[in-house]
Structures are given as C-alpha cells and as structure tokens.
Amino acid sequence: METIVFSLLNGVIYGLLLFMLSSGLTLIFSMMGVLNFAHASFYMLGAYFAYSIMGVTNFWIALILAPVLVGLVGAAVEKWGLRNVHAHGHVAELLFTFGLAYLIDEMVKIVWGRSSVDYRVPEVLDFPLFELFGAEYPAYRVFILMVSVGMLVALWFILNRTRAGLIIRAALTHPHMVGHLGHNVPRIFMLVFGAGCALAGLAGVIGGNYLVTDPAMAVQMGPIVFVVVVVGGLGSLTGAFLAAMLLGLMQTFAVGVDASFADLFGWLGLTATSELGGITIASLAPMIPFLMLVLILMIRPRGLMGDREL
Amino acid sequence: MSEQAMKSYDDLAPSATDKFRQRVLPFIVMIVLLAAIPLFDPSRTMNSLIAAMGINIVFALSYNMLLGRAGLLSFGHAVYFGLGGYAVLHAMNAIGAGSSGFWAGFPVFMLPVIGFGAGALAGVVIGWPSCKRSGVPFAMISLGVAELVASAGYMFGSIFGGEMGVTSDRMVGPRLFGLSMGPVEDIYWFIAFWTFLGTLGIYAFTRTPLGKMSEATRDNPERVQFVGYNPDRVRYLVFIFAGAFAGLAGGMSAVNYEIFTPESLSLAPSGLVLLMAYIGGIRYFTGPIMGAVLLTYMQSMLSDYSEAWLLYLGLLFIAIVMYAPGGVAGIVYGLLGILRRGGTDGVLARRAKQAAGVALAFTGLVILVEIAVRWSNGYGEVFEPFGLHLGIDTPLSWFLIAGFFAAGFGVLRMAREIEEGHG
C-alpha cells in the first residue's frame, strides 16, 4: 500500500514534468514537422539559467526569468538557424537540431563546468509537507505538481479559448491555409518554437533541482521526450499528456517492484541463479520507454491519439 | 529518326576510358597509397591513427549505404558495429582456447568475416521491424532499438562483459601471410587489407541492381512500387548489407583494440558515425571516406590541442548542414569543377573571398572559445597563441575577437554582394 501510494504520487509528478517537457515538442513537431533533437538541451538550459539567476537574486525571479530567456534563445535559433535549413527538407532540419544539441552540451560544459552544479530547492519550499505511512513527503514535489497543473490549465486555456490558440491549432493541420488567410506563418512558427522551448525551460527550472543539474541531463532526457511525443501521437496534446503520465507511472512503478524474472517465470523453470532469471523488473525500468517506442511505431504508427501517421 | 535516337543514347554511355578512370583508377590509387604508407615508416601514434581511420572509413561507408544511398536516417548504426565486434572477440577467445576443430584452424586475420556475418545477422533480426517504415519513424525506431540493445549490453554480463567489456588476445591461432598479428606493422597490413576490401565491397554493392534500387527507393518509393519492386523489401536487404559491413568494421576494431565495451553499442558512437558521413558528404561515394579521415584526425589530434574540440565539431556540422549540404566532398569536387572550367566570371575569386571571410570569423571564434575554456577550468591558465597573452580581462583579447568577427563578416558580406550583383 505504502509503495503504491508513493509510486503513484512520484509517478504523477514525473509524468507531469515529462508532459511539460514534451508539450512544446509536440506543438513544434506537429506544426513544423521538425523533430527537435535539441529540445532536451533547452530543458537543460532552463535549469542552468535558473541556477545562475538564483545565485544573483532568488528562486521566484528565476522561475519567471529563466523560461523567458530560454524561449528567446529558442526563437533566435528558429529565426536564424532552422528557417534557413528548412529549404533542404526535414532530414536536414533534424540534423541541424542534432548538431545544435551537441553545441549546447559543449557550451554548457564550458560555461558551467563538467560536473553537476549545486542547484538547490529554495529554502522556503524545503520542508516536509505531510507525513504518510511514517515517511515525510517533501513540499517541493507538491510545488512541482502545482506548477505543472497550472501550466497545463494555462496551455489548455490559451490553445482552446483564445484567438492565438485558434490560429495555432489551425496552423497545426493546415499551415498553408493559415498563410493564405493572411497570417504570418513563419512568425507563428518562431513564436511556437520559442514558447515550446520556454516550456522545456520551465520544466528544467522546476525539475533541475528535483532531479540533478549536470551536463548529461539533456542526453538522458532527450530520447524519452521523443518517446512521449511519438507514443502520444502527432498533433495531439491530449495524447502527449496520456503518454507522459503512462510513462511516468510505469517507470516509477517498475522501479518500486521488487521482483525478478525468476519470480515471474519460475513456472517455466527459470532459476534466480541464472543470468536471465536474475534480471529484476526494477533494472528494466530505463528500457520501458524505448520498448514502448518501438512497439507503438510497429503496431500503431499514429500513436495513441494522433490524427495522422508520422 | 529512331536510329538517330539510338545513336545519341549510345553517345551518352561512358566510354571505356571513362569507366576505367571513374571505377578502376581510384582503387588502383588506393592500393598504391596503402602500399606506400609503410615506406614512410610511420610512428607508433601515426600507425594507430591510421588503423582508426581505416576502421572508421569502412564504418562510415556502411552508414552511408543507409543515409546517403537508401535515404534512411539511422541513430543506431553502432549496434551492428558493436555486435560484429563482440562476435569477433568471442571467436578470438575460442581460437585462443583452441580446443574445438573449427576455431583451432581459424586465422585471426580472417576474423572480420565473422563480424560481417554477425552484423548481417543482427540486420536480419533488427531490420525486420525497422524497415517497414522510412523517414522519421525509421529514425525513431533505430533510436529505440539502439537504446534497448545498449541497455541489454549492460544486463547480460556473460555476453557483453558488463562495464568492463570483453577482452581478448589476438596473437593466437594459425598465421596467415606470415603475419603474427602482434606488432603494429602486422596490424597495418591487416587494417589495410580489410579497409580496401570493405571499400571495394561497398562500392561493388552500389553497382548491383539492388544498390541502384535502393537509390530509387530513396528518391521515389511509389514509383519503385509501380516498377514492380517492394520498397520495404529493398530497404530491408540494404539494411542487412549495411549492418554486415558495419559488423566488418567492428571486427577490424575488435582485432585492433582487443576490447569492446557495451558503450560502443550506444547512441554516442552512432551519432559520431552520422557526423562522419554527413560532414564528409553523403551524396558522394568518397564523402564518408573524407569525413572519416577528417573526424578521426580531429578526434585524436585536435583533442590534444583543445578541450573544446567537440564544440568545434558541432559547429562544423551545423555549418555543413546550413551552408554546404554536399559536405567536404561537395566543396572539394565543386572547387575541382571550377578549376577544370578555368574559373569563369570570378567564381574562384568569390570562393576565395568566402573562404577568407569564414577563416577570419572562425579565428575570432577560436580565440573566444579558447579563452572561455581556460576561464571555465579555473586553473588560472591563460590562452597564449604566438606569445600573445590573452586573458579574460585583457582588452587585447576582446579587441582581437571583435576585430576578427567584424572583418570576417565584412568579407562575407562583400562576397555576397558580388554574388547578388552577378545574379
């Protein structure tokens, strides 16, 4: 019971973080067809910017300022980089962002060093909020939960209830028509790219101190973000949300399960001393996202809720 | 009329001299080059660098069978390289044990054949689910498979040796061509032989009907279906061969280094081979060769000079993607073409101006990066090129950076204005 409740809570938080990271990528990918390899690098930038800003001022200013800065960097990348590559096709765009990820990684290493930085949870939020089954639950995780839900509601409101959201949704499926109606589609692309990067930056700000802030965080997170987008389906934020929650919960639960292959398949004669039998479910947790990715692409290429195939 | 049409078609076919010049001569040059290298008595470092280049040439060429020829962007090509390498290491250990009949008589020199087979086998198994899709889905599947195989590598210690990897000893088994495989000179002939054979094999593959069909599938899969081929099947077959040649390169690497770790299966080496092929130029057969030579050189030499060599690599890659999609080979052949035509309307002058602009701006960038790296390390080290003292708080350094950038972009703008004036 205890494990289940904690896994549920942590899984939801991890899932929400994943969703925040991948919502921007889903928008970018559906609208521009660009699978942004550097998306997780913007997440990393968010964490590092917040760390630096926090050194000068405090966490709350960092919470606002860091995502804005990341968004500006993203918009600049779109305007002066990606847009020029667009003419060479999607593979060139993908490769451009692949190179960009390399570049941001190296720049982060130069500016902030190769080891992890001491980006901490602000003291105001660094206390146990409540006690559950004799274990304390940190307030910061609940703060993450609140920020993520707030972001979710705001994103939903903007996309579904405002004029800007209307245009963005139209540009997701019919960019040419939106252009014919007199909207500046390249500018919309730039804004959406910037906003998507800002969301990734926000995820970095609140996730960087929850997890760890080091130059490897982009490489670790990057492929998982792809999984969320692909499993969720092209053009569907709901799908991305479902996929993120599913992944978050599955990974957290898998880590919590104390069983090995021998326990599961003992009836087939698999012993715990053999190599295959000794593999635990917990050690499989990092593989789950990629298993899902491959299976979804083979069985249901449009993803859970996608409106079209990749 | 029809006779005339026939005649003009005949004229289009390459003449025997053209065929010789384009298809045979490069390989003769390669043989001569490979045979000449030992005459210069290369140092130990040079020898190991050449070995790494040979391995990477075959690896990058096999990657280009997918990306350049078949239009399949793979993020998991190192899987086949690694699996081939592991198979060879296990075979080498079996030779070393020398108990069973087959392995006891197997020369280490021929081991890359095992790598070829293992890579092909891995391609057969993994390619089956991957090749049902092309484009971005294919890239994503290859990424997922690479992550899965790499994690499995850490899990099955008896096959992949865990973190430590699998090691072996190459000085076992019967000798071939009188090579004991011990000293670097012997290894040179081993690498040279297999680099040549790998290159020749991959070139021969591009000349087969299957190789031609793979290019057709890249350009227009629908049309391929109309002609009566199954694009999925073509992709699958090409994928198997690409895996096999990657396995061959892995086998060369296994004999050369005598060790493989599960890390060699992961995304990082797959990304590096992508960079090699693309920077070299995926539209040309020789492109990946140039890319492999350049990047291997950068990897071992530039990393001694600068810690930020990966940053320069990333910049080079982005510059190629943005401004020279033909890669290094595209630039080289473009220049050769201009020279052959005699550099009409100042094209050569314009290119030279562009090159000068890029070089100037790049110098500024190098100064900036090198100063930043030393400042970031915090050891109080200072960048001192040509006896200049360039610290982070020296006005001269910022003056130089700004000056080089301004001059570089100024020259580039001038070159562009000339171009627009011509257009």
Image: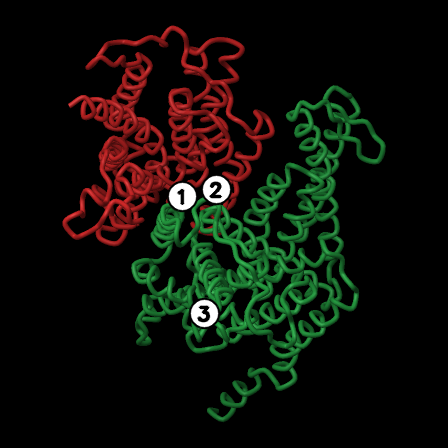
Name chain B's colour.
green
Regarding residue A44, the answer to whether it shows in the image is yes
Q: Is residue A109 above or below residue B206?
A: above
Name chain A's colour.
red
At label 1, which amino acid type do we have? Answer: Val
Which chain letter matches label 1? Answer: A
B232 relative to B6 in the view: left or right: left
Crowd band around label 1 with a 10 angstrom C-alpha radius: few (<14), some (14–19), many (20+): many
At label 3, which amino acid type do we have? Answer: Ser
SS of the residue under disc 2: helix
SS of the residue under disc 1: loop
Which chain letter matches label 2? Answer: A
**Residue that carries the numbered disc 1 in the rendered image:** A34
Q: Residue furthest bottom?
A: B3
**Residue that carries the numbered disc 2 in the rendered image:** A97
Marks 1 and 2 in Cβ contact (< 8 Å): yes
**Residue that carries the numbered disc 3 in the rendered image:** B99
Q: Residue at x 53, y 60 (%)?
A: B59
A17 relative to B38 in the view: left or right: left
At label 2, which amino acid type do we have? Answer: Thr
